[in-house]
């Protein structure tokens, strides 16, 4: 039995390990967090790209932890180059156009260490606590400028009256639980097993919108 996320967990900040909510950061701290989070993953790949090349184009879920302001985005260097190479322009960057979302729960080392960064379209603004669907990008090469991760849909707002989402498996002491909705298997999502299990919808089953 999978326990659904309680509304209080989605709406309010908690001090418990199993329900840790993103904290409000001062601008300078937030910018530093953005820079560090975007620099590289453990495999040396920008957080704006999927952690594994075989996930390019696939859909994944993340819970928004924080968003960047326009000024913070414009002050990025290499990562801003990735965004521009992906077809975006500086005029596309507004407050909230770049977000960080956690894909595993629930410890700082996993919440922030494995978090993904993604572009937020202007017609789909998000706030911390929202659960979103992300289309994974692809890493740039000498012949391909690549494409950054992009949010395609908000699957559940933080203040939703009913939650259909959970951290799977439902064991509070685990640090690498993954987001799960009960509708996922019926909509073509599969569990990719490995060192860290991941629910995703492969690119072949998730045509570009």
Image (tube, rainbow, N blue to C red):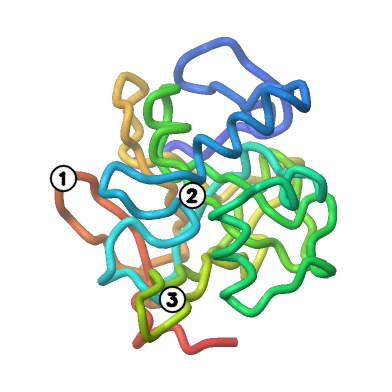
Q: Which residue is mark 1?
A: 195
| Residue visible at 29% across and 25% down in the picture | 174
Q: Which mark is residue 90?
A: none
Q: Position of residue 132 (x, y in %)?
A: 60, 57
- Which of discs 1 and 3 lies nearer the camera? The answer is 1
Indicate which disc residue 187 carries.
3
Most foreground residue, 24 or 199: 24
Q: Is residue 113 above or below residue 197?
A: above
Q: Quadrant of the N terminus?
A: top left
Say if mark 1 contacts mark 3, CB within 8 Å.
no
Q: Is 113 left, or right, of 74 in this rendering?
A: left
Q: Quick one: quadrant of the C terminus?
A: bottom right
Residue 188 appears anywhere in the view? yes
Q: Earlier in the sequence, mark 2 or mark 3?
A: 2
Which one is in front, 82 or 105?
82
Disc 2 target residue:
116
Q: In terms of depth relative to the viewer, which is nearer, 20 or 100? A: 100
């Amino acid at each position: 039995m999978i326990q659904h996320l309680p509304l209080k967990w989605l709406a309010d900040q908690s001090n418990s390990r199993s329900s840790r909510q993103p904290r409000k950061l001062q601008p300078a701290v937030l910018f530093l967090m953005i820079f560090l989070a975007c620099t590289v993953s453990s495999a040396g790949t920008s957080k704006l790209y999927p952690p594994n090349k075989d996930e390019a184009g696939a859909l994944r879920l993340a819970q928004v932890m924080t968003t960047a302001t326009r000024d913070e985005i414009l002050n990025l260097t290499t990562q801003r180059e990735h965004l521009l190479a992906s077809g975006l322009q500086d005029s596309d960057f507004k407050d909230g156009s770049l977000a960080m979302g956690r894909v595993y729960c629930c410890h700082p080392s996993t919440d922030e260490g494995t978090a993904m960064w993604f572009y937020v379209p202007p017609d789909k603004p998000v706030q911390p606590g929202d659960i979103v669907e992300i289309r994974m990008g692809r890493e740039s090469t000498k012949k391909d400028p690549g494409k950054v991760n992009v949010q395609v849909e908000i699957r559940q707002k933080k203040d939703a009256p009913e939650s259909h989402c959970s951290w799977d498996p439902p064991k509070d002491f685990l640090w690498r639980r993954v987001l799960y909705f009960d509708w996922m298997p019926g909509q073509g999502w599969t569990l990719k097993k490995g060192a860290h299990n991941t629910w995703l919808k492969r690119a072949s089953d998730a045509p570009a919108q």
